[in-house]
Amino acid sequence: MQFGIIKERKNPPDRRVVFTPEELVRLQKEYPEAKIKVESSDIRVFNDEAYKNLGMEVADDISDCDVFFGVKEIPIEYLIPNKKYFFFSHTIKKQVHNRKLLRAILDKKIELYDHETIVDANNRRLIGFGRYAGIVGAYNGFRAFGIKYDLYTIPKAETLQSKEDLINRLKRQTLPNIKIVLTGHGKVGMGAKEILDGMKVKQVSTDDFLNKIYTQPVYTQIDVLDYNKRIDGTKAGNNHDFYKTPKDYTSNFERFTKVADIFIAGHFHGNESPDILTREMLKASDCKIKVVADISCDVDGPIACTLKASTIAEPFFGYLPSENKEVPYTHPGSIMVMAVDNLPCELPKDASEGFGEMFMKHVIPAFFNGDKDGILARAKITEKGKLTPRFAYLQDYVDGDMGNN
């Protein structure tokens, strides 16, 4: 089995990599039968020398490898027929802009494994960059607050080296007695929590957050039943009831808009789940929220002020609730929104290290143990020019009219 670490070719450039040099050394040690090649890259956060110095083969041509590992979508012209590829294809939700890519993968009889489809037997995702999206997103939320109120100036996360650097910068700032509400208990939400806890922001219960006045910054981390209620007025049983029948619920997040200054959105939002922060809530005269860090970043989704995805270069924009439109974030009546959709790119070293550890733990063993846990079988989207049964729902997407694409 020969593994290839491919060069990232999507624009804007992404400096992350699936495996750090040290993680490849570990892979080679634990699976001596594996052969590894690293494609030369001038943008990767770990340069070619870092791999060479640890004994890895770095080459311009790695086309003789069997399995290729990358992060972002691969330009169609660089796809090699009859190979196995792992990368974020952004096709499993029928994203129209990548229909050509999936068609090309099928035409070239490539076996595609998407990082998002690597799940356990209970369909829980095993790897991803969510934790680092949460870490950077929370940092950006506080950076936005400092800019909006001209309180402090901290550098962009991409200019710093690690999570510790981000926390150290934030700890130097003096915050007023603001309240921060954080949604989500998954990898994203818990990543954001690492920043809040690292800053020593006091965590309080939901009831205390809603009802008490504090002389210091505080935050509460809430789950789906904290910000959704049953439409029929009956008491919700548990989270599973919400996940099973989300249409029976409506948001009561307005409880938090009346007291929170910053909203950090780190939740997962299912297709049929109710919107969380609506336009009506934002327009209300008693809405206190002035900064929204939407890490989940579903455009035209559950957070009404997320009108677009912002960029690392221009991470902030203003939202004017009265007119439901984008304005400069300096506009006095605006809510400042951060909705960057590729946050882990700002912390490429940490993100790559964490990703490689997860990949090594959950995926690599499957190549050498006959895939006894079904990791590869569940993750495989295409095989021999066809969609696998698990992903047959994508057939109408593949067959669909290409339109202007």
Image (tube, rainbow, N blue to C red):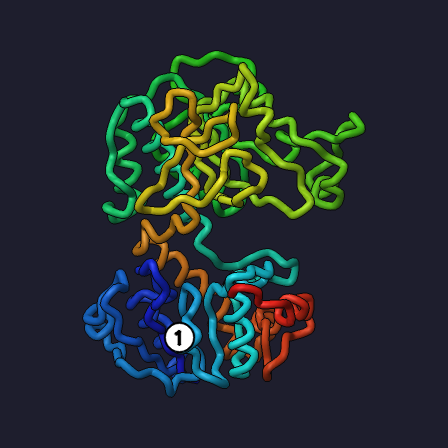
Left or right, 255 with respect to 39, comes to right
Q: Nearer the viewer, residue 124 or 104?
A: 104
Left or right, 223 with respect to 339, comes to right
* Residue appearing at x 59%, y 21% in the figure: 255
Q: Position of residue 6 (x, y in %)?
A: 35, 73
* Residue appearing at x 49%, y 44% in the figure: 297
Placement of 123 over or under 158, stated as above or below:
below
* Residue appearing at x 31%, y 27% in the figure: 146
User: What is the residue that sits farthest to the bottom in this orientation?
Assistant: 64
Tell me if residue 338 can be seen.
Answer: yes
Disc 1 target residue: 30
Left or right, 376 with respect to 349, comes to right
User: What is the residue that sits farthest to the front in this orientation?
Assistant: 404
Amino acid type of the residue that numbered disc 1 sits on in the rendered structure: Glu
Tell me if residue 218 can be seen.
Answer: no
Tell me the element at label 1.
helix
Q: Position of residue 97 (x, y in %)?
A: 51, 62
